Amino acid sequence: MLNTAGLLYVTSRAISAGGNLLAVAIFSHIAGPAEYGHYVLIFAWSMIVYGFGTQWMRFAYFGVYQTQVVYQYVAALAQLLGATLAVLTVVLAGLVWLGLHEAAFAIAVFALVCGMTIYEAAFEVARTLLHAGAASLSMILRTCLTIALGSLSLWLGGGATGLACAIALAHVLAALPCLATFADVRLSQGTRAACLRILRYGWPLLLSFGVNAVGQGIDRLLLAHYAGAAALGPYGVVADVLRQSFAVFGEAIILSLVTTAKQHANEGEMQNANIALQKAFNACLAAAAFGAAFFFVFGDRVLSMLLGEDFIAPTRDLIPILTIAFAFMTMRNFYFAQVIYFTNASHLELVVSALFLVVSTALALVLVPSHGALGAAISLMVACIVSCLAFMVIGRRWFALPIDPVGVGAIPALAGLFVLGAQATAHFLAGGTVPLVIDALAFALFSAFAVHRFGLLSAIAGDSVGVRSA
């Protein structure tokens, strides 16, 4: 039997990712490297504010909600988010009043933070209520609205700030299908106990997500400082395309398999939870390994067609480095970091995020001034590898997430064989479309074999866990 929720999430996330790639191609061509670099800078600061402000709450909610009284936690989440956004409004207004930020820049950052907060929180609630259809619809709707509103804003001359505000509006409108799944929830249903439980569990996440956002953005901030927005534009757009591509399957794994495992754990069915988690491990490993293999072989061609030479020429040598970085980030974010939802050790996210920040900042400060974008890519790659290994080792002291030894050996081996085969094809059949066709068929066969061998699209026994609300 197929895992229908997983297929819904994979399909919608794939459509969304394809649309996001189209959006990046359209926006970068209209805006150009310098203006798009300005938008990348706005987005980097937005992610930092979002990380320290509201991002942690949706994950804290997922970590502590109780199936039997879920609506109390939904209302409590809304109360906490509303209060935090009010505080952020005052803080950003104060920074503008003091002359520390331009008004347009602050408005663009705040708009993006509000849009992401509403969308992500609504999406999180919809998926914990097991409304995969509504969540998938919101995902696709966000992509369509982003392309339409973002393109319109740039065409009308809105520039980087206008693009940011348009994308924020797209997030708000796309949240409507998810919001409709719990429209009957009242704010008054939120209890003091639910709020306190979210806060107690989530306060380490407040620091960790903020620290992690700084760590993941420090390469961009320093690159913009030392080399300017024109250098940041190509680096940012290539990194975003690769990150989005890896996130397609990573997010689908969380939304289907990890959500199922969490539901089983809430019901005390740890055997079923471990079965779901082991399948999530193999799926995540396949996404990382075959994603890396794909970009090693096809990355230059795909990105050149998508973005154009103005963006690819300065970053061509960075593609393998960024590919390795996001492969390890996939394993960290979408599997090993999930340990915090099956234990009370939410502080692990803060510890590993702090390590990520220290490594990425130290390397970026050393490498970016002298090596520019190459130094930024190397600092990101090393930080991703170190943080993934740290989560894998430290997390097992609190909860041993299943690791399939057969998958560890077979899945990377299959991906590696594909890469070696592609190199052999390039050596013996240089030029033309024949090697490309052979490589594409080989990739399809190797990846399909991995999916079939490890049952990555099959449903898990007893995964039809329902949500009972009160």
Image: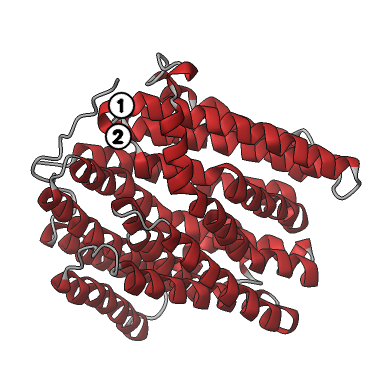
Instruction: Give the residue at mark 2.
Output: 66
Residue count near mark 2 (Cα–Cα under 10 Å), binned few <14, some 14–19, many ≥20:
some
Please state if 211 lies on the left or on the right of 258 as rendered. right
Note whether 221 is above or below 74 in the view shown. below
Specify the quadrant that holds the C terminus.
top left
Disc assigned to residue 69 = 1
In this rendering, position of residue 448 left or right of residue 135: left
Residue 283 image point, x, y percent:
25, 58
Residue 112 lies in quadrant: top right
Q: Secondary structure at mark 1?
A: helix
Q: Position of residue 89 (x, y in %)?
A: 73, 35
Residue 453's disc number = none
Q: Is residue 115 above or below residue 188?
A: below
**Front residue (pair 162, 87):** 87
Labelled pair 1, 2 in contact (Cβ < 8 Å)? yes
Question: What's the residue at 57%, 44% (across, down)?
Answer: 23
CA gap, disc 1 to disc 2?
Answer: 6 Å
Q: Report x, y in % for residue 218.
A: 65, 66
Q: What is the three-letter code of the residue carrying label 2?
A: Gln
Q: Label 1: how many residues lie within 10 Å, few (<14), some (14-19) or many (20+)?
A: some
